[in-house]
Image (cartoon, rainbow, N blue to C red):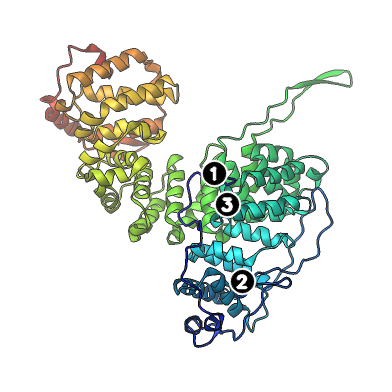
Amino acid sequence: DILRRSVPRPHSFASVPSRSPVPAAAELRGGNGSSGALMKEHGLPVPQSPMPLAVDGPQSQGDFVWNPPPPSSPAPSSLPPASATPSSPEPDREAVQRVVKTLWALAKDDVSPSEAVGLGLSSLLAGSDFSSRDVVPALLEICCKERPALVSAVWDQLALSGEDLSNLCHSLGVAGSFLRSQQWKEAVETLRSKADVLRTEDVLEVMRCGNDVPASLVDVMRTKACAILEEPWSNSATPHDVVLAVQLCGPMAALTSLWSRVEELHEELAFSIEHITTIFSQCARVKHLEAVPQLRRNRVESVGLGIQIGTPKIPPLGTRVVQLFSDHVCEKIDSLTPAQICTFVVALTSTSLPMDEFWLFMLAKRVQDTASEFSSDQIVAIAKGYANKRLEDDAFFEKLAISVRERPGDFTPSQLADFLFSCAQIRYLDEELCRIALSPLRDLGKSRQLGASLGSAVCAAGMLDQRTFGMTGAFRALRPGKLHRDVLVNMPQALLAFPRGVEQFMPQLLRELCLAVAARRSRRLFERRLVLIGTACVCGVPSVKQWSPRLMNQLAVSLRTLQIDDRNYEPPSSSFHMEVVAVLRFLDVKHKLEVPVRPFCLDIELEPGQVAAAEVRTAGEVPNFAVNEDLRVG
């Protein structure tokens, strides 16, 4: 199989289903037939005679093949320069949509896809100034969005020719995800034979399919892209060339080799927002962009004197990319689409690029004003990005939460759980959102449907102190090995709010934390979580009954084996503030946050009477752990 597909797409059209015998051509094309009635119903002209769509060659009755006239071919070269595509009249999209609906109705009316496509195109082109070449991209685009099952049949009947590479590549970029392997194979052979005259813009059109592009075609395109990084093409690279090289050669190699040219193009304002969006999207896919090695200081003698001259420090590549495009994109914030905004947020909050707070602030204000225009995937991705960077803005998350509450049916249970976890990370509480997202956790079957997002839901419930929702089914379905890092770090703090969670899930969580510490992944952070569990155990939180001797011994062995260094416990001030507040909440100790006391502003204020009441309330529950001194870690 030449396709790199891990799983079949849900709307892929593997084969044309068998149909009943096709009616006579006169019945299909006549004004009194069922097809004619359908066309009249949708306001389409009914052709009185078949309109041939092929310019040469024989064709059988009902078999419509379109062969567009060959355009003027560019001069062959190893890497032809990019040129603007001649503008063509934009077809009436409403008319195209009516054609697609008619095709669908005809397909349900026992008419073969071949006849349906022919009749639809004939109706669309009758009495208009458009050719089938003008209509093809719009027809395929609307079919992909509204009737994916028709795409394969439409592609077969259009018989796209290699003589028009631009139209073929654009059509592949639009409909490639819905094509069969044989259709891709034929297109690959055509493009391989025309690789010398293939333009950069055409390659970018095909790359819109992403992972659906066959590996054999990607290799051909990568060879073409790598030539851009070498002399003399690198000195005259166009924005299309830069984007293609970033996509196929990787952002690190492409931007490092072409950086001088990128700066020149940026000064000329040659990059469009689409170009910049693609570059940032590719940068976000790598783990990090390595810093350029700093040159050593050289000793240069001038006029007989030894003068120490140091080369200027070159910032990391990711920093230079953000600094170069920041002002240009911020000036066009109002014209960005939701997809472009989401791409920039994901990239600027990733590990590969530095965080530009002003840029993210401008993006947040745009999202806040137009939250209803973003899809569910985009809302969840944006919330996750801001939460991971701990960018707390209650007004911003309130707008996102309102958008989620107004259309809960657009969000899957997994998306609701992930969004609630993002809110919990920045300590934003929305009671109605908690009810929507956490209600399914009472049922074991519904909890299992959340998959990997179940840990996010449980962790969010604990961090937001939502104890009214039954978690029995959730803890039975929870698997520690499927928790991603952010959830695993915060799960000890969250579990202390649920006695049932300590009893059921704490043994597995202890093993996961020990493995994480042994692997030295954020060792200090995981060690602090183990110390937090030990302190809670000593203080009888959440309840003495939940700490069985077996669990206490396991905790003692974990703490003794890891040999935790007390110096590793001190966290940053902001993280320590959150941990103290979480423990006070678990102990039901009333406290005030950010209390102004001139000339200071206290982070947390506890009144003596509140502390005394908490000590009296918990005095009878503190267990006697004298038998195990290893647990005295607080």
Residue 528 visible in image: no
Residue 511 visible in image: yes
Give the number of the mark in front: 1 or 2. 2
The numbered dot on residue 63 is: 2
- Compute the Cα span from label 3 to label 2: 22 Å
Q: Quadrant of residue 126?
A: bottom right
For label 1, the crowd category at 10 Å Cα-Cα, with few meaning under 14, some 14 to 19 and many 20 or more, is: many
Q: Position of residue 334 (x, y in %)?
A: 55, 60
Q: Which residue is mark 3?
A: 181
Question: Which of 590/244 is in front?
Answer: 244
**Looking at this rendering, what residue extends furthest in the bottom direction?**
32
Badge 1 marks a residue whose secondary structure is helix
Q: With 384 as the anchor, is 530 left or right in this view?
A: left
The numbered dot on residue 348 is: 1
For label 2, the crowd category at 10 Å Cα-Cα, with few meaning under 14, some 14 to 19 and many 20 or more, is: some
1 and 3 marks in contact (CB < 8 Å)? no
Q: Position of residue 444 (x, y in %)?
A: 23, 43
3 and 2 marks in contact (CB < 8 Å)? no
Q: Position of residue 236 (x, y in %)?
A: 80, 48
- The quarter of the rendered structure image containing the C terminus is top left
Q: Upstream in the sequence, badge 1 or badge 2? A: 2
- What's the amino acid at mark 2? Asp
**Looking at this rendering, what residue extends furthest in the left direction?**
620
Question: Which of 66/385 is in front?
Answer: 66
- The quarter of the rendered structure image containing the N terminus is top right
Q: Upstream in the sequence, badge 1 or badge 3? A: 3
- Compute the Cα span from label 1 to label 3: 37 Å
- Compute the Cα span from label 1 to label 2: 52 Å
Q: Upstream in the sequence, badge 3 or badge 2? A: 2
Q: Quadrant of residue 459?
A: top left
Q: With 274 as the anchor, is 147 left or right in this view?
A: left
For label 3, the crowd category at 10 Å Cα-Cα, with few meaning under 14, some 14 to 19 and many 20 or more, is: some
